[in-house]
Image: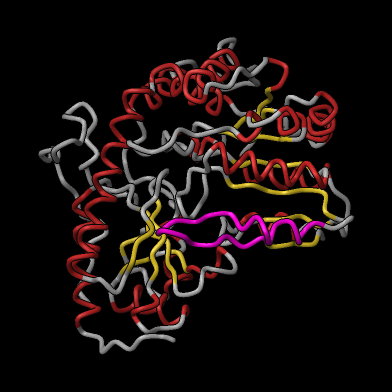
Amino acid sequence: MQKTDTNQKITNPTPLSGAGGLRFNFDEVIDRKGTGAIKLERCKTLFGTEDVLPLWVADMDFRTPDFILDAIRQRLEHPILGYTMPPKNYYPLTIKWIKDHHNWDVKRDWVGFLPGIVPGLAFAVQCLTETGDEIIVQTPVYYPFFHVVENNNRVLVNNQLKEADGKFVMDFDDLEKKFTSKTKLFILCNPHNPGGRVWTKVELERFAAICEKHNVTIVSDEVHADMILPGNTAHTPFSTVSDWAEQHTVTFMAPTKVFNMPGLISSAYIIPNPELRRIFADYLEASEMNAGNIFAYIGAVAAYEHGEEWRVKMLDYVQANIKYVVDYLKMNIPQVKPMIPEASFLIWLDCKELGMETDELHQFFSLKAGLGLNKGTIFGAGGEYHLRLNVACPRSILEQAMTQLKVAVSNKKLTVVN
């Protein structure tokens, strides 16, 4: 295995074409060692070695934007970090951002602070369903969807996605069969993770019509909504596709993913239905989980007020990284077939032609190629023979990753799994 250099540093590198110029330098390689970064600290446990390029956790290796860091620094000039109310512009800016980017006229009383989207999923399961109720998900999907169902003694039901023309599509015929009298909730990933699908309005309308027949509540995880890649269909908030959807949907959004500040734990719920909103808001209040810390609010305000140029440049850079990986694999490692994402910075890799079962495949990437990627099976049924790759990193890291993979594959005698 080629030795990896996860602590490589570049000082004032020349930006790649389309990288956004010197103002936003996405080529900068930043050493995250010693910061408690999950993607580094868990490598030994997950991959059997620390000697991997960690391309798994869905945060970015780009510098958190200066306008966010500067806002936090400015607040730190005051010597007291006391109990704090949300800034007066927190909710107006959140609502304006959603209107400007997703054409959704959100009313002020629909919105509340949420201390993280995954906790929000758990809260929704706990307050909107009972023990033994059935909750439907669509695998392969972000794995906490399973945890919040099973850890709360609910019954997980899978409406597995299909693949057509190189992307995931919903299996509506199968969906019709999955509802029972015990089905109370559907957790939707919109846009989809790990496949990067931006569900179209037509798809969501058909999905909503089926759910309406069975009168279930939808929890829509829309954390990737602000990460639609250039040239793709705009994001459609599920709540906007019909009057029924508006009154039966709990939507979660956040600036933390797109602006690379997930450690601030700053999200929002949007619930138009007053009774549904009352149940959810009362649960958060009773749990003392309805407020954020100082920096959660400050980071969100800075992002929504100053972040648009950075967001656009970042997505351009990520799009170029995706193209680089897709082209490299096609030319050098055609056995690995990427699903080209329409949103976010994650690529779903079909590695079946490498001739290995999923566990062996995961070990091959980590121990032979020196790459730490997510194992496909953690995303549920349909994840066999797959891995998830995070490309939100400097191009030089991706180049190193692809070179290491090419060397490892060329050194292995390949057989096809039937």
Q: Is residue 281 above or below residue 154?
A: above
Check if residue 157 falls in the magenta segment. Answer: no
Q: Residue at x 76, y 60 (%)?
A: 178
Q: Residue 77: horizontal and vertical position, in percent?
A: 43, 17
Residue 246: image location, x then y, percent: 71, 29
**Image colouring:** secondary structure
Residue reaching furthest left? 14
Quarter holding residue 8? bottom left
Name the residue rendered at 37%, 66% in the picture: 372
Q: The magenta stretch spans which residues? A: 159-179
Which is nearer the eye, 172 or 55? 172
Q: x, y percentage for residue 407?
A: 19, 76
Question: Is residue 41 rendered to the left or right of residue 239?
Answer: left
- Quadrant of the drawing holding the N terminus: bottom left
| Residue at left offset 37%, top offset 54% | 390
**Image quarter (top left, top right, bottom left or bottom right) of the C terminus:** bottom left
Q: Is residue 70 above or below residue 287?
A: above
Q: Is residue 342 left or right of residue 119?
A: left
Residue 169: x %, y % from top left = 53, 54
Tally of marks: 0
Locate residue 409: give its quadrant.
Answer: bottom left
Residue 162 highlighted magenta (yes or no): yes
Q: Looking at the image, is 218 positioned above or below residue 307? A: below
